[in-house]
Amino acid sequence: MTLNDGTVIPMFGLGSNIIAAALTQGYLLIDTAEFYNNEQSVGVGIKQSNKKREEVFVISKWWPTSEGANSALRSLNNCLENLESNYVDLYMIHAPKGGCCADAYQALSEAKKEGKI
């Protein structure tokens, strides 16, 4: 499937503690989120699978708060630390609402230019 910015992602993915087994079986899209509290287990699962990081498409998400851009960037950096990765393939705003998302979107666009996304 191709996203609006041209990013191509697999059509099916899993987001659970069976990451290593799933990757070994050929599932190459992993859906994680700060809200799911599973980013660290995803990072461990990727390592256990012996797959190269660039072989796995990792999605994570920020849960909007009133702190906007600062919270989004802090969450992204925590995500990367938890995954033990220097980037995610796609970082989304989870359930966007309120006025804080526009600033967060701009900050995350800059993070994408920096290679974090």
Image: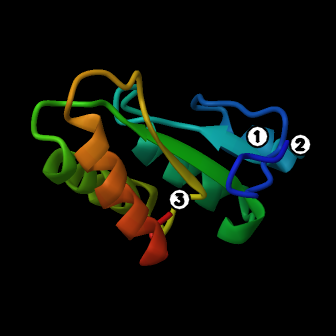
Instruction: Report the amino acid beneath label 2.
Output: Gln
Q: Quadrant of residue 5?
A: bottom right
When asked about the image quadrant of residue 6, the answer is: bottom right
Marks 2 and 3, Cα distance to the nearest angstrom?
A: 21 Å
Pair 1/3: label in front: 3
| Left or right, 72 with reference to 108 | left
Q: Is residue 52 at least partly visible in the picture? A: no
Image x and y of residue 114, in percent: 42, 78
Q: Position of residue 16 (x, y in %)?
A: 59, 28
Q: Quadrant of residue 107?
A: bottom left
At 69% from the left and 31% from the top, the residue drawn is 14
Query: The N terminus lies in which quarter of the figure?
Result: top right
Mark 2 and mark 1 residues within 8 Å of each other at the beta carbon: yes
Q: Residues within 10 Å of mark 3 (few under 14, many from 20)?
A: many
**Residue visible at 65% across and 41% down in the picture:** 30
- The 10 Å Cα crowd at callout 2, few under 14, some 14 to 19, many 20 or more, is few
Q: Is residue 28 visible?
A: yes
Whichever of labels 2 and 3 marks the residue nearer the N terminus, that label is 2
Q: Is residue 32 left or right of residue 74?
A: right
Q: Is residue 69 left or right of residue 66?
A: right
Determine which of the numbered discs, if any, sits on residue 21 in the image. 1
Q: Which residue is mark 3?
A: 88
User: What distance separates the C-alpha of mark 1 from that of mark 3?
Assistant: 20 Å
Q: Residue furthest right?
A: 26
Residue 32 image offset from top left, x and y in percent: 51, 37
Residue that badge 2 annotates: 25
Q: Secondary structure at mark 1?
A: helix
Quick one: 52 or 115, which is closer to the camera? 115
Residue at position x 57%, y 45% in the image? 59
Q: Secondary structure at mark 2?
A: loop
- Identify the residue at image location x=61%, y=30%: 15
